[in-house]
Image: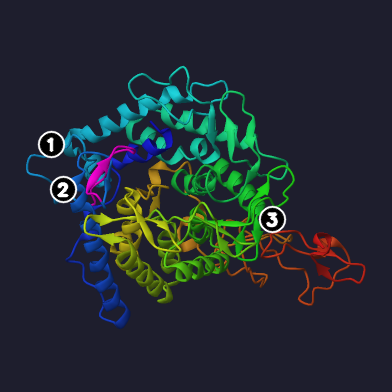
Amino acid sequence: MALRGFFGALLMMFLVISPAVFDQSVAVPDSRWEAKRRLLKEKVRRMFYHAYDNYMTHAFPHDELKPLTKTFTDSLSELGNLKLEHLPQDYNGSALTLIESLSRLVQGSYENQLLFLAKDLGERFLPAFDTPTGLPYAWVNLKHGVTADETTETSTSGCGSLILEMGTLSRLTGDPRFESAALRALRKLWSMRSSLNLLGTTLDVETGEWIEYSSGIGAGVDSFYEYLFKAYILFGKEDYWRMFHSAYLAVQKYFRHGPWYHEADMRTGKATYWQLTSLQAFWPGLQVLVGDVAAANSTHREFVHVWKKFGVIPERYLLDHQMVHPTEKYYPLRPELAESTFYLYQATKDPWYIEVGESMVNSLNLYTKVDGGFASVRDVTTMQLEDHQHSFFLAETCKYLYLLFDDQFLVNQNYVFTTEGHPLPVIRDWQERLPETFIPTNWTFVKTDKQTRRASAMSLQLCPALSTPSHGWRMESACHIPDARDNHRCLTDEDCGIDSSTCRRRSCSMAGYCGLWLSL
């Protein structure tokens, strides 16, 4: 059984989403855009239940629906129900992972049976961490543990994206073993980074050696970056922030090319593959959390351009040739672009993102909706379909689109979404210390009372869009440090700052001007 896939199921048993998400009684202000949002919300709701009802009719209790043939496949962990409704009368809760809010669970609903099940599942995962390095195997048999012939190869995201679920499980149960195992693996993984603060894509869990040195922000690495920052938000541990800060700057330095991100060798920083992958579309959403909204918007718009070009996003697109990868032309109903669109709308309230969401909803209904559900696209150039409706279409794609059009769920509580789209509440008692910049009264707070040295918004743990530094610096990105003088004149390198786009240090030329001279 895939270890990473089942970690999504750990908290899906009881921390997926509140039934209030689909509460029809919430009043919405009357305006042109709010009226459009209401209509689109209902359209997404119908999409969800078209897919869900077909699953219940043709595939339950198996893993996934095959919408073209109206049959099923067993390949993933169990499916969650976005609301306790549309269940068979004789359903006893043995296969579907029920949806319930954290508060009701903690107060004793179901006599904490779902939490007991989650703890039991977590204990069955622990043998996977029993390696010389502490890095977990990618697969574990839930009955027998790790088999003797199990592969020792795993991905960076596979062993570095466990801390949210395992940390939450430890806090809910009072058992520190889960968080300790995930934290040990994360720290070991970070110790394997290169001198450039880059990591590879695949590694050996027994030797701790890298197998694939080429890396990027897409498949095999993506959620590693995501979980470093989200773990800091959820648990407040400074270790997570320091790791993320270094990793984020390295990504901006070595992977970014304009609005795009290519792959590079972790040892040298040299570009290896110039390609867009659909999983990279999560990155703008993460940048919104960092406060790098301008950079997020720039990259997001490029993904939207590709979506509009094909009607959906191909799994892999060759940037240097401006063409779809010849063997990866498919679109399996992925949620990442919807996720980033949701985050950007939350940050800006720009109605353009509502239009993007509307375009996605229309494309999904036009190209992928069939009588038996929603089918993946085999070839984006012909829109030929394949017989597969992934469970993440329900758990993530529909969820993020719905929340884009109805965000009442987020009004009175802050959440961190896992990489599988499950919201975990940000709870003060879970924090080692609540970062001062997360307190609303300190959103424009700057730690520069006696500070003479210029620093980036990221170093100050501030949002560039909200910060108003007392020295009058204009922070253009999370890493940006302006030059000492507005005219960019300099006497030494100390007068030069950090470039806002590449996060590279600017230097002073012989003519006395700051610039990226060392990069030329």
Instruction: Give me the C-alpha separation between circle 2 and circle 1.
Output: 16 Å
Q: Residue at x 65, y 72 (%)?
A: 474
Q: Which residue is drawn at the image coordinates 21% and 71% (left, top)?
A: 27
Residue placed under numbered mark 3 in the picture: 253
- Magenta part of the protein: which range? 69-82
Label located before the other in sequence (3 or 2): 2
Looking at the rendering, in which quadrant would you find the C terminus? bottom right
Q: Residues within 10 Å of mark 3 (few under 14, many from 20)?
A: some
Is 71 included in the stretch rendered in magenta?
yes
Q: Is residue 195 above or below residue 320?
A: above
Q: Amino acid at mark 3?
A: Lys
The residue identified by callout 2 is 57
Residue 461 placement (x, y as % from top left): 57, 56
Label drawn at residue 92: 1
Residue 339 lies in the magenta-colored region: no
Instruction: Identify residue type, mark 2.
Output: Thr
What secondary structure is marked by label 2?
helix
Circle 1: residue type:
Asn
